[in-house]
Amino acid sequence: MKSLQKNNSPTIDNGIEQTWEFAHPSNRKSTGPLDRFKTMLKGKSYKILLDHLDHEIVQENLNNSVALFEVSVLGKDKSYYKFKWQVEKYKIDGPFKDCWLTTMVSAPMPLGSSI
């Protein structure tokens, strides 16, 4: 979330690229390749995540292989949004074995203005 909050630091779209690095291979198949993923994150639903003002992450559920979080974001528009964010532990041998990778991020749920 911190890299998305400062998406263009130290380079343009660095936050998106770092988020892509933590995407589960099954998620990459539906959201990728990287250029398509960048377009998706800059689109109407997910642009809220880019350069947002603040965020809070609350763990909702955790077992040995799946974790679900509620992520609240204060967007640049001074409105709050909530996302469900799921990660899974990757089980297949290779460089990602035993890493927690993103398998799902819900569409944003508006929570109202901060003003």
Image: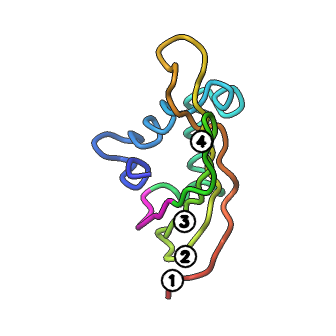
Q: Nearer the viewer, residue 54 or 58?
A: 58
Q: Are marks 3 and 1 in contact (CB under 8 Å)?
A: no
| Colouring scheme, one of rainbow, by chain, secondary structure, one colour | rainbow
Disc marking residue 39: 4
N-terminal label among 2 and 1: 2
x, y percent for residue 79: 55, 76
**Which sits earlier in the primary sequence, circle 3 or circle 4?**
4
Residue extent of the magenta highlight: 51-57
Disc number lying in front (1 or 4): 1
| Within-10-Å neighbours for mark 1: few <14, some 14–19, many 20+ | few
Between marks 2 and 4 in the image, the one whose residue lies nearer the viewer? 2
Identified by mark 3, the residue type is Ser
Instruction: Give the Cα distance between marks 1 and 4.
Output: 27 Å
Tell us which disc is closer to us: 3 or 2: 3
The disc, 3 or 1, on the residue closer to the chain's N-terminal end is: 3
Contact flag, marks 3 and 4 (Cβ < 8 Å): no
Residue 42 locus on image (x, y percent): 56, 49
Q: Disc 1 marks which residue?
A: 114
Res 79 label: 2
Residue at image position (65%, 37%) is 103
